[in-house]
C-alpha cells in the first residue's frame, strides 16, 4: 500500500518536534515572568494572594497551553473589583506585558 | 498625528449607557441607586497603528461592573449594557468594540445587604476616520 503524502507528513512531524520542544521552554519562561509580575502587582497585606499565584504549561490537542491563576479566593475580587471597589487588573497587565514578546518568539521559531 | 484620547472614548461609553436609561458611575459607585453599572477605564495596551502613523491607532480597555439586588437582576443589567455598547461611536474616529471576557456574577463580600455584581471587560480599537 502506498500512502501519498506520508513523507511530507513525517517531515512535518519531525519539524514540529524540533519547534515544540524549544517553544515549550519559551512558554514556561513567559509563564514564569507573568507569574512574577502578577505577584508583584497584587496588593500585599497578608501575602496570601501573592502566594496563591501559580502556573502550569501543558500540551493539548489544540497546541501548547499555559494556565496562570490564583488559588486564593479573594484574587478574583482584586482582579475584577466588587460592587463598590474598582478592579486592580494585575493579571491582565502582567499578561499584556509578556504575550506580545511570546508571539514574536513563536514567529521567529517558525521562520527558522 | 491623530492620537486617540482614552477620556473621550470613556465619556462616549458613559453617555451611551446613560442614554439607554441606565444609572452609570464613572469609575466610582458612591451614591448610586440600584440597579447601576460602573464603567472603569483600564490600562491601555498602547498604540498599534501602521508604520508611519503608529500613534494614530489605539486599543483601549474598559470594564462594566453591573450591580443589582439579585443575581438575576445583574444578568439583566449586563444584557442591557451589551445591547448598547457595540453601537459606540466617537466623533472623528472609527471604533470597533469587542468583549474580551465576562466575570461571573457573585455576591459582594464587602456588604451585609445582599448585593450582587458581575460584568464584562471590553476593548475599543480606535482609528481616525478619513
Image (spheres, coloured by chain):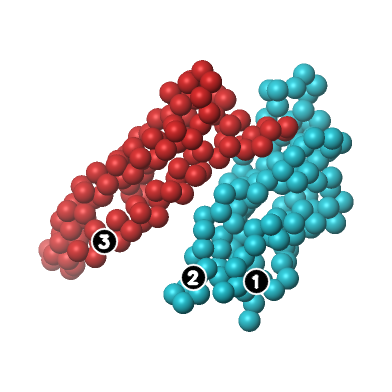
Q: Position of residue B105 (x, y in %)?
A: 68, 34
Give the residue displayed 40% in from the left and 51% down from the top: A99
Alpha carbons under labels 1 and 2: distance apart: 16 Å
Q: Earlier in the sequence, mark 1 or mark 2?
A: 2
Is residue B7 visible in this depiction of the protein? yes
Furthest-bottom residue in this view: B130
Q: Mark 2 and mark 3, same subunit?
A: no
The numbered disc on residue A108 is: 3
Instruction: Kindly state the secondary structure of the residue where label 1 is placed.
Output: strand
Give the residue displayed 27% in from the left and 47% down from the top: A26
Label 3: few (<14), some or many (≥20) within 10 Å? Answer: few
* Foreground disc of the pair 2, 3: 2
For mark 1, name the chain.
B
- Visual hue assigned to chain B: cyan
Instruction: Kindly state the secondary structure of the residue where label 3 is placed.
Output: helix
Label 2: few (<14), some or many (≥20) within 10 Å? Answer: some
Dividing the image into 4 quarters, which one contains the N terminus of chain B? bottom right
Q: Tell me whether circle 1 and circle 2 mark residues in contact (CB < 8 Å).
A: no
| Residue B116 figure quarter | top right
Alpha carbons under labels 1 and 3: distance apart: 33 Å
Give the residue displayed 60% in from the left and 68% down from the top: B3
Left or right: where does residue B27 sit relative to residue A63? right
Dividing the image into 4 quarters, which one contains the C terminus of chain B? bottom right
For mark 2, name the chain.
B
Chain the render paints red:
A
For mark 3, name the chain.
A
Left or right: where does residue A32 sit relative to residue B76? left
Give the residue displayed 53% in from the left and 20% down from the top: A45
Residue ID for mark 1: B94
Residue ID for mark 2: B54
Amino acid at each position: 500500500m502506498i500512502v501519498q503524502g506520508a513523507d511530507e507528513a513525517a517531515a512535518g512531524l519531525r519539524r514540529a518536534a524540533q519547534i515544540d520542544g524549544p517553544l515549550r521552554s519559551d512558554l514556561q519562561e513567559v509563564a514564569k515572568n507573568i507569574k512574577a509580575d502578577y505577584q508583584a502587582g497584587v496588593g500585599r497585606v497578608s501575602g496570601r494572594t501573592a502566594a496563591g499565584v501559580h502556573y502550569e504549561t501543558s500540551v493539548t490537542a489544540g497546541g501548547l497551553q499555559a494556565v496562570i491563576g490564583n488559588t486564593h479566593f479573594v484574587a478574583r475580587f482584586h482582579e475584577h473589583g466588587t460592587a463598590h471597589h474598582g478592579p486592580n487588573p494585575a493579571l491582565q497587565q502582567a499578561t499584556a506585558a509578556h504575550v506580545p514578546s511570546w508571539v514574536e518568539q513563536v514567529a521567529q521559531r517558525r521562520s527558522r | 498625528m491623530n492620537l486617540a484620547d482614552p477620556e473621550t472614548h470613556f465619556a462616549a461609553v458613559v453617555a451611551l449607557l446613560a442614554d439607554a436609561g441606565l444609572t452609570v458611575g464613572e469609575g466610582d459607585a458612591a451614591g448610586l441607586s440600584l440597579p447601576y453599572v460602573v464603567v472603569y477605564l483600564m490600562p491601555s495596551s498602547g498604540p498599534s497603528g501602521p508604520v508611519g502613523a503608529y500613534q494614530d491607532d489605539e486599543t483601549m480597555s474598559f470594564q462594566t461592573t453591573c450591580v443589582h439586588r439579585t443575581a438575576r437582576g445583574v444578568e439583566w443589567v449586563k444584557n442591557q449594557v451589551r445591547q448598547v455598547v457595540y453601537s459606540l461611536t466617537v466623533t472623528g474616529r472609527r471604533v470597533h468594540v469587542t468583549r474580551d471576557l465576562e466575570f461571573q456574577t457573585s455576591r459582594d463580600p464587602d456588604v451585609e445587604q445582599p448585593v450582587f455584581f458581575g460584568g464584562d471587560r471590553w476593548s475599543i480599537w480606535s482609528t481616525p476616520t478619513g
